Amino acid sequence: MADLLPVSDARAAVLAEVVAPLPAEPVPLDHALGRVLAGDAVSAEDVPGWDNSAMDGFAVRAADTAGATAQAPAVLRLASESRAGSPAPVSLGAGEAFGISTGAVVPAGADAVVRVEDTSSEGDLVRIAAEVEAGRDIRRAGEDIRSGDTVIRAGSVLGSAELGVLASIGVAEPECRRRPTVAIVSTGDELLAPSEPMRDGGVRNSNAYTLPALARLAGAEVVSVERCPDDPDATREAAARATRADVAVFCGGVSVGEHDHVKEAFATAGVDERFWGVALRPGKPTWFGTHGGGLAFGLPGNPVSAVVTFILFVRPAMRALQGAPADLDTVDVALASDVPRMERRDQAVRCGLTATAQGWVATATGPQGSHVLTSMLGADALAVIDAGVEPAAAGSKVRAELLRVPSGIE
């Protein structure tokens, strides 16, 4: 294995190969959750489109309520109504009140809304028990969005709020980057599906479930998930199939053992090696290469090592392919306690995050062995501890890769 790359250098080498995002395509709004916007969303209309009522009540001229109290109410004639979706057909005149619903258009001639709880009605008369000033409880046209405003920037991941805003400005099919296709292959004669009976030397194939899930969470389209034996011919055939996708990911078979065939299989498939070996625990034997516009990764087979290297190297590439920031999932955290360093390798520490007034605080989840998949339970992030001699001190800031949205708030 050649000289090991620091994590930051390996990550930069991966991102350097993403020369441009994938092409854009129109996506129906109800299928756009999690997609990445290809261009700025610019509104062609005001939101709201007209002055409207913030309350149920009565539209009035503020001057007609001057001095009104519960003991001496102003009495106005109920002349019409403006309902949500059905504006009043006439203008409001002096001494008049129009019934009005929340969200309904404020009629011409009115400059305030009196809340229904400050009124009483009898026949066609409305008693106003509180004076209101001009503008009271009126939402102005364009108060939220003005025509011509850029409301969402290119590269934004579309969540529920973004979908709602796009709907509010009349965008039915936003232009989004195409999702990268991903093929995932787990290698090893020992691998068993969850439904298969256990046998001596067998290992459940957890990578076939964790990595596709991580890929989908990163916005990718998983086109295949295969299991490949430790056989040169089978591995070459699997590599030929996997490299048809934008991103090919192999788990296992990339170390220096007699039965590790992935590097040779990638070479046969026309993949050029960019690096092999990262100064990282866990995840040292990580491999990366390119072919045409495609990316290929050889990740360690140990379950935690596979997750860690996917998060640190594959996920940023998927973000970049979609035009999103590669560091979209990166935050700064403070260590809750001292963490021993490794002299020559960075560490990815599984940790839980707690929000404090000073920011996120990271606490290790427990044993950090690369085979201990349960250490991922309760983990919110991977805190990356740079190589060094002295421990990383409690309170020091480090970079962390989010695994999920943290929930604990102090």
Image: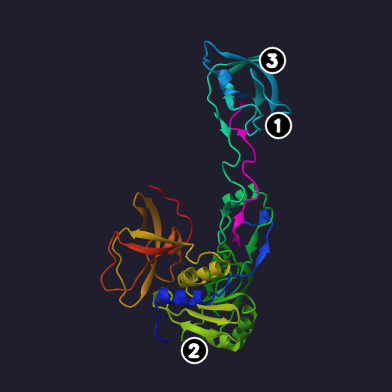
- At horizontal 54% and vertical 84% (from top left) the residue drawn is 262
- Locate residue 32, reporting x and y percent: 64, 57
- At horizontal 36% and vertical 73% (from top left) the residue drawn is 346
**Type of the residue with mark 1:** Pro
- Locate residue 263, reporting x and y percent: 53, 85
**Type of the residue with mark 3:** Asp
Residue 258 badge: 2
Q: Quadrant of the N terminus?
A: bottom left
User: Residue 195 or 288: which is nearer the viewer?
Assistant: 288
Numbered disc 3: secondary structure:
loop
235 relative to 30, above or below = below
Q: Write the start and end of the magenta stretch as one range.
A: 34-57
1 relative to 178, above or below = below
Asked if residue 353 can be seen in this view, the reply is: yes
* Residue at the disc numbered 3: 124
What secondary structure do most residues of the magenta stretch adopt? loop
Dot 1, crowdedness within 10 Å: few (<14), some or many (≥20)? Answer: some
User: Which color scheme did the rendering employ for the protein?
Assistant: rainbow
Mark closest to the chain's N terminus, 1 or 3: 1
As for residue 50 lying within the magenta part, the answer is yes
Q: Quadrant of residue 135?
A: top right
**Type of the residue with mark 2:** Glu
* Real-space Cα separation, disc 3 to disc 2, in angstroms: 94 Å
Q: Nearer the viewer, mark 1 or mark 2?
A: 1
257 relative to 374, above or below = below
Lateral position of residue 365 relative to residue 17, left or right: left
* Residue at the disc numbered 1: 87
Mark closest to the chain's N terminus, 1 or 2: 1
Lateral position of residue 364 relative to residue 148, left or right: left
